[in-house]
Image: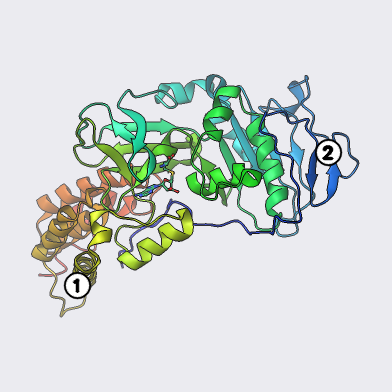
Amino acid sequence: TYLPSHSHHLSHQCWHEHPFSTVTLQCLDGGNSENVETIRGRLITPGSPSRPAFRISSDTSQYGPWTHQPICTDVLQSLGSPLCVYTSASFSNGRGISIFTTPKIAEEFASLPAIQDPTILETRSINIDSGTWHVQEMSGKGMGMVAKRNLKFKDRITGYTPALLAHVEDELSTLERERFFRLAVNQLPDAMRDMYLRLATVYGDPRVRVQDIVKANTFQLDIGGQNHLAVFPETSRLNHACAPNAQYYLEPTLLTHIVHATRPIQQGEEITIAYTSPVDFTKVRQQNLQNGFHFTCTCSRCSDQARSDATLKQIQDLQERLNDWSASSTASPKTAEKLLQIYRQEGLEGFLTIPYGFAALAYNAVGDTKKAIKYANLAKELTLMKDGMWSANLGMYEDILKDARAHWSYNRRL
Ligand SMILES: C[S@@+](CC[C@H](N)C(=O)[O-])C[C@H]1O[C@@H](n2cnc3c(N)ncnc32)[C@H](O)[C@@H]1O
């Protein structure tokens, strides 16, 4: 069976809430990590025996690629390991990066091409302004990203590394986590730290500001087989739409978030991505956006729920038919063409990977290898913009492209 891949969704995760009323937290807004913090009634000063000191060493040679001494939590039971803050202030020409993860995964990070070879990001034009967008206030949505010039399908809009990466866990209290996240952000170079701290929040509570920013802006990245929350400050200005004109993917070895235009975008038009799967029913999309980001979607697909859901039902039915490989299957290339047409009508050009895949199979199944190859190419091209080169579905498109007649689907529906 041909299953759509759902990797790299924006996270809807919430951190565990703890009551704040009994707690005082002296915020570190000035960015001075030597400040005294009161956490859960326990006074922690630099040099406190219960925790390592918040100290920035002048000798950077002993921390490998990290420019600061790693500061760690106690061993977390669920991980069997502490989590530590690793910062490289010199990463990507002084852009900087902070990672809150286990020492073992930190070693994996340290061995990634993005960290090992400072030229690799430059060669790929990562962390370089493409000159195609700017940020401006959008009515009812806060800030948003707007096209500075006309963009074509496939144009790359952004390619950026994160300011902050954090291993997912639910063992630390919100305030303990905040303490480490804050250290991570405060250790970033000034420009990066300031850009991070200007990002949107969900709750607006200054005591958990750094996590609040994570909540409003996080993507998930799998490193070392573990989920990491990642905040990409530039890309964070992309608002959500259920019929977005751009698509993103995450490239783990380069620690990069890459956005492409999935249809022509006019100068002055807002650039949007989908925070939740646009082929979910309206109620599910609204719930995900509420839970994850605390806003109500008012785009045309959300406003006209009856129409949007009826179309989604049609999409489901067509996909079910196309997935039926039994002798009594009614699926044909026409079924696949209908599916493509509906996706385009709905403004789901950035999600055509699955319909293209179905079209490749449906044409191959009636022996039309030319069309099968055309659609396998389209599916491959879009998958690279949507899921990156690690997508499990690429193999199937490659197989059809290599030898359509040798593929299991060839002449299956004759
Ligand atoms: C990743 S940020 C996007 C940029 C943000 N608007 C800003 O000012 O930085 C996510 C937040 O933007 C807002 N947002 C994004 N898409 C929206 C939409 N379609 N309608 C209303 N608010 C939206 C929500 O407040 C959400 O929590």
First in sequence, mark 2 or 1: give its number. 2
- Residue 140 screen position, x and y as percent: 35, 46
Rendered-image quadrant of the C terminus = bottom left
Badge 2 vs badge 1, beta-carbon distance below 8 Å: no
- Nearest the eye: 375 or 163: 163
The secondary structure type at the circle numbered 2 is loop
Q: Quadrant of residue 20?
A: bottom right
The three-letter code of the residue at mark 1 reads: Arg
- Nearest the eye: 2 or 15: 15
The three-letter code of the residue at mark 2 reads: Pro
Establish if 88 lies above or below 247. above
Q: Quadrant of residue 17?
A: bottom right
- Residue 31 screen position, x and y as percent: 67, 29
Read off the residue under disc 2: 52
Closest to the camera, between mark 2 and mark 1, is 2
What is the number of the mark on residue 321? 1
**Lateral position of residue 312 relative to residue 232, left or right:** left
